[in-house]
Image (cartoon, helix red, strand yellow):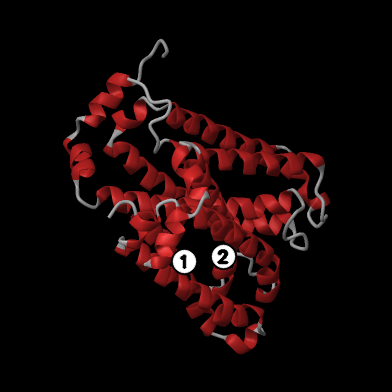
Amino acid sequence: MSLVSLRPLFEWVDAFPSSIALRESDYGYAVMLSSHVVSMALFAGLIVMMDLRLVGLGYVRTPISQIQKRLFPWQMLSLGLSSITGGLLFYSQPMRYYGKVFFWTKAVVMVLAGANALAFHLTTYRSVAAWDSDPVPPFRARLAGALSMALWAGVVVFGRLTAYPWLTFN
Amino acid sequence: MPFFQWLDSLPFNKALHVSDWLSPANNLLHLLSLVMFAGALVIVDLRLLGRGLTQEPLAQVARNAQPWLIGGFLGLLVTGIPALTATAMMQYYNSTFWLKMYILLAGLIFTATVRRKVTLANEARVGHWAKVVGLVSMALWAGVAISARLIMLL
C-alpha cells in the first residue's frame, strides 16, 4: 500500500479487549449503527439545507450569513455525534475496514469536503456582506455549495458501500 | 398476507433479485433521500423549539423547507417501495418492519395535520405547543429511521 503501513496499528487496536467486547456484544453494533445513521442524516441534512441556499435553489429569501451562523452550532453538534458513533463503529472492528477500498475513499472524500468548507470560509465567504441577500450568489459561492453537496453525498455513499463485500482485500 | 405475496410476485422484483447492484443502488438513493428529508424536517423542528433560524417567522421557515421536505419524502417513498417488494415475504414476518410501519403512519398523520397547522399558524397564538410539536416530530421520525435500520439487525 505505502511506505508506512497502518496495518500493524489496525491489528493492534483490533486486538484490544474493549474492541473485542464491543464487536461481540449483543446490541452494540445495532446501537452504534442506528445512532450513526440518525446523527449522519442530521449533519448531512443541515449541510444540504445550507448548500441549497448557496447554490441559489432554496431558502432564497434568507440571508446566507444568517443560515451559516444559525445552523453552524447544530451542524457541529451532529458532526460530533456522527464522529463519535463512527469512531466507535471503526474501533469495534478496525481490521474489517482496513481492507476496504470504500472505507479509505470515504476518509479521503471527507477530508476534501472539509477542505472545501475551509477554503470557502477563508476566501469567498469574506465578502458575504456584498451578496448576502442575493437570490443567486456569486459563482464561487455556488461552486462551493455544489461541491459541498457532491462531496458529502460521496461520504454517505462510500460509507454505505463499506457494507458490501466489493473491493475488499487482505 | 395475500398482498405481500402479490408484492413478492411483481415482475420488477426479478430484476432486483438477479442484479447484484440494483438493490444496493436503490438503498443508496433511499439514504440520500433520507438526508434531504432529515435536513428539511429538522430545520423546522429546531425553529419550533426556538432554535436555528430564529430571525425569521416560523411560517416562513416552514414554507421554505416544504418543497425539500416533500421532495425528500417522495424520494424515500419511491425507493422504499422496491426496497420492500424485493424482500416482501421476509419483511412480512419481521416484527421490526411492522414497528417501523406503525411509527411511519403516526409520523405521516402527525406531520400532515398537527405539525402543518402549527408551523403555518400565527406564532404568538401557538405558544408553548410549538416546542411540544417539535419534540414529537423529531421523536417520531427518529423512531422511523432507527426501526428501519434495525430491521435487518434484530
Percent x, y of residue B128: 52, 84
Q: Quadrant location of the N terminus of chain B? A: bottom left
Label 1 element class: helix
Relative depth, front residue between B8 and B73? B8
Query: Badge 1, how many Cα within 10 Å: few under 14, some, many 20+?
Result: many
Using residue B127 as the reference point, say whether residue A77 is left or right of it: left
The image shows residue A27, relative to residue B16, as above or below, that is below
Percent x, y of residue B61: 67, 69
At 82% from the left edge and 51% from the top edge, which residue is drawn?
A136
Dot 1 amino acid type: Trp
The image shows residue B71, relative to residue B50, as above or below, that is above
Q: Chain of mark 2?
A: B
At 80% from the left edge and 48% from the top edge, which residue is drawn?
A137
Please give the label number shown on residue B41.
Answer: 2
Percent x, y of residue A96: 31, 31
Relative depth, front residue between A30 and A111? A30
At 52% from the left edge and 42% from the top edge, which residue is drawn?
B25
Please give the label number shown on residue B44.
Answer: none
Q: Quadrant location of the C terminus of chain B? A: bottom left
Dot 2 amino acid type: Leu
User: Can residue B20 be spotted in the picture?
Assistant: yes
Q: Which residue is mark 1?
A: B141
Mark 2 or mark 1: which comes first in sequence? 2
User: Can residue B39 be spotted in the picture?
Assistant: no
Q: Are the two marked residues, 2 and 1, in contact with CB atoms closer than 8 angstroms?
A: yes
